[in-house]
Amino acid sequence: MLELNDIQRRILQEVADLHGVPEGAYNIRSDASSAGRRSTANIEITPKTDVSGLDITIKPFTVNESVHIPVVISKSGLKEVVYNDFHIGEGANVLIVAGCGIDNCGSQDSQHDGIHRFFVGKNASVKYVEKHYGSGNGSGKRILNPVTEVYMEEGSSMEMEMVQIKGVDDTERTTVAKLAENAKLVVRERLMTHESQRAISVYDVSLDGKGSSADVVSRSVAKNKSYQKFDAKIAGNAECHGHTECDSIIMDEGKILAVPGLEANDVDAMLVHEAAIGKIAGEQITKLMTLGLTEQQAEEQIVNGFLR
C-alpha cells in the first residue's frame, strides 16, 4: 500500500498532512489511479462505474471518524476529471480531508478538475479541509479547478477550510450550497498568488430554510503580476442570516477584484457583505525592521500572519 516516490510523499504531506497511512477510511489517488483504499465499518468507499470517481457513504450517527481522499499528480501532461459524492447520514459528525498537489517538471500542462458533491443529512456535522499545492520547475502549468456542491438538510452544519498558498498557476474554484431550515455553513478561504498566476473563487449560496445561516470569509494575498477574483453571492430566501467578507493584501503589480452579491427574497433575510483591499502599512514593516528583520523578511512575517 502507498508505494509512492519521494515527490508524491512530499505532496501528500503538503495537501493532507499525511506522513504515512491515515487512520480511518481513505483513498489515495496518484497519477489517475488508486494507490490505496480502505473502508471502515461506518464509512464505505466505492468506485463509480460510469465515471472516474468515488461514492463515499457515511452511516447515520457515525462520530469521531475521518475520511482522507487526497490526489497526487507527478506526471507532466496528465489531465483528469474526478467525481466524488459524499452521503453523510443523519446525526453523523466527521472530518473529511481532500486536496490535490501537482508536481510538474515538464513542458506540458497538468490539470485536475475535482467535482465534489456533499449530501449532508439531518443534524449531521462535517468539517471539510481542502488544500491545493503546486511544485516543479517545468514550464508546464499546474491547473486546479475544484467544484464543490453542498446540499444541507435540516439542522446540519458544515465547516469548510479552503487553502491554496503556493505553486498553482491557474485555478477556478466554484462552490454552490443550498441550506434547509436551521442549517449552518461556515467557509474560511486562504489564498496566495504570485508571478502571473490567476485565481478565481466563486460562491453561490442559497439560504432556503428558516433559521439557516452562512458565513463566507476569504483572506488573500496577490503578489507580482498575479490576478484574483472573489465573487460571492448569497440569496436569502427565508428568515436567515448571511455574511460574506473579502480581506486582501495587494503587492507589487497584483490585481484583485471583489464582487459582492446579496439577494434578499424574504423580508426577514439579513445579509451583509464586507470587502477590504490594500497594501501592507509602512509602519508595520518599519516596526519589524527595528527588531532586526530585513524589509523582505518583514513582509513575509506580515503575510504569513495574515494568512493563518
Image (cartoon, rainbow, N blue to C red):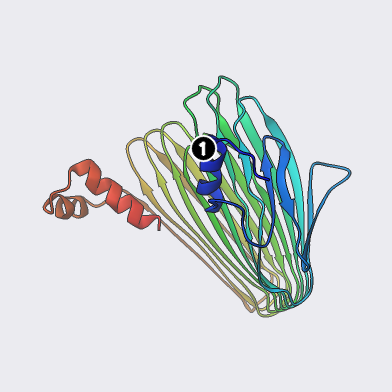
Residue 165 horizontal/vertical position (percent): 46, 46
Q: Is residue 54 above or below residue 92?
A: above
Looking at this rendering, what residue extends furthest in the right direction?
A: 50
Question: Left or right of 250: which side holds 5?
Answer: right
- Residue placed most toward the observer, 136 or 264: 136
Q: Quadrant of residue 86?
A: bottom right
Quadrant location, the N terminus: top right
Q: Which quadrant, please, contains the C terminus?
A: bottom left
Question: What type is the residue that disc 1 sits on?
Answer: Gly
What secondary structure is found at the residue carrying circle 1? Answer: strand
Expressed as whole percent of the image width and height from the top left, the position of residue 61 reads 75, 77
Q: Check disc 1 and report the residue beneath it.
A: 134
Residue at horizontal 78 percent and vertical 74 percent from the top? 60
Asked whether, in this view, residue 62 is left or right of residue 250, the answer is right
Task: Please give the count of numbered marks on the rendered protein.
Answer: 1
Q: Residue furthest top?
A: 107
Query: How far from the left and from the top, in percent, is residue 256?
Result: 44, 44
Estimate how packed mark 1 is, as few (under 14), some (14 to 19) or many (20 or more) residues with alpha carbons within 10 Å.
many
Which residue does the image show at 61% across and 58% down from the upper left? 233
Q: Residue at x 51, y 45 (%)?
A: 229
Q: Is residue 197 above or below residue 200?
A: above
Residue 49: x %, y % from top left: 88, 45
Within the image, what quadrant is residue 250 found in? top left
User: Looking at this view, is 110 or 189 the one in front?
Assistant: 110
Residue closest to the eye, 80 or 195: 80
